[in-house]
Amino acid sequence: MKRFENKVAIVTGGARGIGAAIAHRFGSEGAKVVVFDLDADAGMKRLEMLTSEGVEGIYVHGDVARELDVSRCVKTAVETFGRVDILVNNAGIGFSGKPLFEQKLEEWERVISVNLTGPYLFSKHAAKVMAGLGGGVIINIASTRALQSEPNTEPYSASKGGLLALTHSLAASLAKHRIRVVAVSPGWVDTSRWQIPPREPALTRLDHEQHLAGRVGKPEDIAALVAFLASDEASWITGVNFVVDGGMTVKMLYLDDAVVADAIVTLTGDSGFAELLRLALTADSGVRMKVKEIMGSLLKS
């Protein structure tokens, strides 16, 4: 399929991971691809990989949080290919994981600048070009952390939650220009094979089997949805967020003996062992103490 023939797509953070898979998917379907990334070595290597497969594209170096870099990228895309039809705001950075009381303001500001201000700036500049062409599509790569959190994720979660709000705000503002704006929120996606150089995934059976879909996600999963949302087939979709997480966010987890037993079965494959531990967990304190003593002696031997 060549759904994007004669189309030009900018992918921020397109050198590695999900962004690289998205750039590859657009290129494989006929788009001219602009890879924007802060890592010049990785960006040039990704471009080499794309062009070796017959994809027409360019690499532009820059920081999404710097408006001069953003405007230069859009200007370069127009000067090179004459247009911009699709923007994928994929570039993002993570967080330190430090407890709230130890987090630095500088970390907060940098995460917000890259993950939220960057998409705002790119949308502002790219949408102006799209409006002059009669329309386009902007796709923001958010995260399931926009919807639910683990401890100590404040900068990242806030940036991705803001990105969802930015998505529907842009959709409302740009509708008159026939520009659609959509968000995609990936869950756990293993990007090992889309790094430079590629790596083998280091995943366990538990990593895969805790997902309702039976596996951890791949960048190709996200790229497939992004390609659909950017296509004419999705012309009635705008302003909304799509969660792609193998079913993780719909699971209701209450920590009890059955959950622990199921986890042990997944880890060991031994249902008998899991049942013994479940019974030990629900037994009276005397039995639990005896089990503890036995297990302690086994570990020492």
Image (cartoon, rainbow, N blue to C red):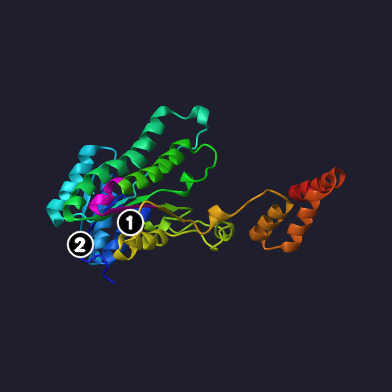
Q: Position of residue 105 (x, y in %)?
A: 41, 28
Residue closer to the observer: 204 or 91? 91
Q: Which residue is mark 2?
A: 56
What separation in Å lies between label 1 and label 2 (alpha carbons)?
14 Å
- Quadrant housing the N terminus: bottom left
Numbered disc 1: secondary structure: helix
Label 2: state its secondary structure.
loop
Dot 1: few (<14), some (14–19), or many (≥20) neighbours within 10 Å? many
- Magenta range: 173-183
Horizontal relation, residue 294 to residue 28: left or right: right
**Residue 6 left/right relative to 230:** left
**In-image side of 157 versus 60 (left or right):** right
Figure quadrant of residue 193: bottom left
Three-letter amino acid code at disc 1?
Ala
Q: Nearer the viewer, residue 255 or 3?
A: 3
Q: Identify the mark at residue 20; answer none if there is no mark.
A: 1
Residue closest to the eye, 68 or 39: 68
First-in-chain label (1 vs 2): 1
